[in-house]
């Protein structure tokens, strides 16, 4: 254990957790002890009589029930499968240099080496105990992968698994990775202490028992028993929660104290890279990966993308000079034999965790390279959103703005969207004809008759009226203020909800074709996505995205603009090879205020013709 203060504190807290376990066992045995005393007194002739006989019967029955319940609870706690983090396992033959680095690091720290290494698509690293029988095949006599010690014949390796954040391997240099992993690997020392290991097993068993009891589908016929097991497990968890938290703090303090002797100066610099990697990873997932996942495509090189994103971030923040020297050193991903394969596996796992995508590729779930991202994701996303917008306008009965010079005069145009979203009072203020004020009443009546739009669906009128009333009674910043705009946003949200409901569910993995449990069997695939990146988009955000997509389609089809990828902002419109950074406020002015003038001026400056039909995408096929 060593003489670290943190280790001693952790051991004291572990003993406190074990004492709670002992008290629970004593409470379960107390009725049985009382029954033994009563039975012994009756057989010896000291406790005789009708009253003692009744007491013996009652206490013995209670003791039997309590012992049976305690046995069931103990069995559930021991057999319940503890939670395990979804990771990408890395075999030693796939990363011999990485295993060698970890082995040398553990030797320098004088602690047991981790039993294996795995990667997680997150900016974090930790040790995870996977010694439970449900976490792997039965133990067999073999040598430990890292320590080289012969394993026991009937026991699993006690050392935990080292989980490393995959972005660290691509962004950090080898020396920085070693410095960051030093405190993590040092935690195997306190973890090997019998008291701490036993306390952790007890807490994990209680947590797994609570999850098992809360699963309604697992024991529908024994719900009262499951409720009782869950109540007892939660009671014990509350009793030892503080001690368990302090025990983990002590283990972390002991690991940090032991790791101070290894690359301390480099670790200070490496911690800065940890924060930078987290910022770049979060930006890459939310701005770049999420639009691709929504389109049924998953970027297959996310870890390589985070390097490009952080490089772009350093260039924009004028930090490239400080990073130029470190980028010349050996990257940590060189410790892998096949970095591309590992990156692809980690990218697919990230898509599952943060979006809930399927576990395998298919027609509607395919990988995409960064070079294909603009065409496969950005272009398809914009044209699909624009098609959905016009489909909703058709459902609302909004008339098209025909272009007599076009091949398809009634094709989808940006003008149709602009006219519908323009505030009605602005339409009234715009003179339609220079001689309108001098027109006779008869001429005015005829003109109104000719210009009268086709009758709209009564349901559409009801939707607009309902939206107007709801906006008056419940003003919301996330809902457009104009009734016409609010009705369009509401129908868009409903259309998206219908499309999501109609999408085929992802197959439930967990078993391989050979019939053996796969990696997904160790964690609940029904809870995907485990870590949603963003809350559901509001109606205003949906409408803004769809109008922006329509503007981009018009720019591409009439002005020669191109879809592009910005590593920090995601899909972007390239006009003349430059990013169009001033489009968003003009679209917001149209959506929120019904003012099309800023957007029309922007379109005119770039030579974009809103009256021309654009090419859309319906269900994966392009239409004009």
Image (tube, grey):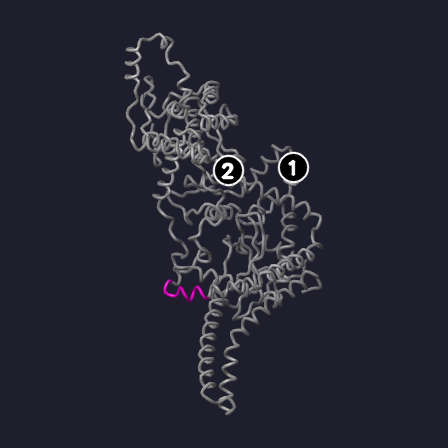
Farthest residue, direction bottom? 45
Report which residue position mark 2 lands on. Answer: 287
**Residue 218 vertical placement versus 307 (above, below):** below
Give the quadrant of the C terminus: top left
The Cα–Cα distance between marks 2 and 1, rounded to whole angstroms, is: 26 Å
Principal SS element in the magenta part?
Answer: helix
Q: Residues within 10 Å of mark 2 (few under 14, many from 20)?
A: some
Q: Quadrant of residue 311?
A: top right
Which mark is drawn over residue 577? none
**In-image side of 10 versus 48 (left or right):** right
**Residue 523 vertical placement versus 447 (above, below):** below
Instruction: Mark 2 and mark 1 in contact? Answer it, CB < 8 Å.
Output: no
Q: Secondary structure at mark 2?
A: helix
Report the magenta residues as a range: 220-228
Q: Quadrant of residue 101?
A: bottom right
Query: 59 or 299, which lies in front?
Result: 59
Q: Earlier in the sequence, mark 2 or mark 1?
A: 2
- The residue shown at (54%, 49%) is 337
Which circle, 2 or 1, is nearer the viewer? 2
- Residue 623 magenta-drawn? no
Q: Position of residue 568 (x, y in %)?
A: 54, 35
Q: Position of residue 385 (x, y in %)?
A: 40, 33
Q: Position of residue 461 (x, y in %)?
A: 32, 30
Q: Secondary structure at mark 1?
A: helix
Report which residue position mark 1 lands on. Answer: 324
**In-image side of 430 versus 181 (left or right):** left
């Amino acid at each position: 254990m060593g003489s670290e203060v943190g280790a001693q504190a952790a051991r004291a807290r572990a003993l406190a957790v074990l004492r709670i376990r002992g008290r629970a066992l004593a409470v379960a045995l107390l009725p049985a002890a009382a029954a033994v005393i009563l039975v012994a007194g009756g057989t010896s002739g000291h406790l005789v009589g009708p009253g003692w006989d009744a007491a013996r019967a009652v206490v013995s029955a209670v003791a039997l029930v309590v012992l049976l319940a305690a046995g069931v609870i103990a069995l559930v706690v021991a057999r319940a499968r503890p939670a395990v983090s979804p990771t990408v396992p890395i075999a030693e033959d796939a990363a011999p240099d990485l295993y060698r680095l970890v082995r040398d690091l553990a030797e320098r720290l004088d602690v047991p080496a981790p039993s294996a290494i795995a990667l997680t698509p997150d900016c974090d690293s930790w040790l995870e105990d996977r010694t439970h029988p449900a976490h792997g095949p039965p133990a067999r006599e073999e040598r430990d992968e890292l320590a080289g010690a012969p394993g026991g014949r009937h026991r699993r390796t006690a050392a935990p698994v080292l989980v490393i954040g995959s972005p660290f391997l691509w962004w950090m240099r080898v020396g920085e990775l070693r410095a960051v992993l030093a405190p993590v690997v040092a935690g195997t020392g306190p973890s090997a202490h019998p008291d701490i290991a036993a306390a952790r097993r007890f807490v994990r068993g209680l947590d797994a028992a609570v999850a098992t009891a809360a699963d309604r589908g697992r024991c529908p016929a024994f719900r009262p028993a499951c409720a009782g097991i869950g109540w007892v497990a939660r009671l014990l968890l509350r009793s030892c929660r503080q001690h368990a938290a302090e025990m983990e703090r002590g283990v972390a303090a002991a690991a940090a104290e032991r790791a101070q002797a290894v690359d301390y100066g480099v670790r200070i610099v490496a911690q800065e890279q940890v924060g930078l990697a987290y910022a770049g990873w979060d930006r890459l997932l939310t701005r770049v990966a999420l639009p691709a996942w929504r389109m049924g495509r998953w970027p297959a090189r996310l870890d390589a993308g985070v390097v490009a994103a952080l490089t772009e971030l350093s260039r924009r923040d004028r930090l490239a000079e400080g990073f130029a020297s470190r980028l010349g050193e050996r990257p940590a991903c060189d410790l892998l034999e096949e970095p591309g394969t590992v990156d692809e596996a980690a990218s697919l796992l990230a898509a599952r965790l943060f979006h809930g995508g399927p576990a395998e590729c298919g027609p509607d779930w395919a990988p995409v390279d960064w070079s294909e991202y603009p065409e496969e994701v950005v272009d398809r996303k914009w044209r699909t959103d624009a098609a959905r917008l016009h489909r909703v306008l058709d459902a609302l009965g909004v008339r098209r703005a025909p272009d007599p010079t076009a091949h398809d005069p009634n094709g989808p145009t940006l003008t149709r969207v602009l006219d519908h979203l323009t505030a009605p009072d602005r339409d009234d203020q715009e003179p339609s004809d220079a001689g309108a004020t001098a027109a006779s009443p008869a001429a005015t009546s005829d003109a109104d008759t000719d210009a009268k739009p086709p009758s709209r669906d009564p349901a559409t009128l009801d939707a607009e009226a309902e939206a107007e009333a709801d906006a008056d009674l419940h003003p919301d910043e996330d809902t457009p203020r104009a009734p016409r705009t609010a009705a369009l946003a509401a129908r868009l949200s409903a259309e998206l909800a219908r499309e999501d409901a109609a999408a085929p569910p992802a197959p439930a993995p967990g078993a391989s074709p050979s019939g053996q449990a796969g990696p997904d069997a160790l964690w609940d695939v029904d809870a995907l996505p485990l870590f949603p990146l963003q809350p559901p988009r509001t109606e205003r955000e949906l409408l803004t995205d769809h109008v922006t997509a329509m503007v981009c389609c018009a720019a591409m089809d009439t002005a020669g603009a191109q879809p592009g990828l910005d590593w920090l902002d995601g899909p972007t419109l390239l006009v003349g090879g430059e990013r169009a950074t001033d489009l968003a406020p003009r679209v917001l002015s149209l959506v929120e205020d019904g003012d099309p003038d800023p957007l029309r001026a922007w379109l005119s400056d770039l030579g974009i013709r809103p009256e021309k039909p654009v090419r859309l995408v319906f269900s994966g096929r392009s239409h004009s």
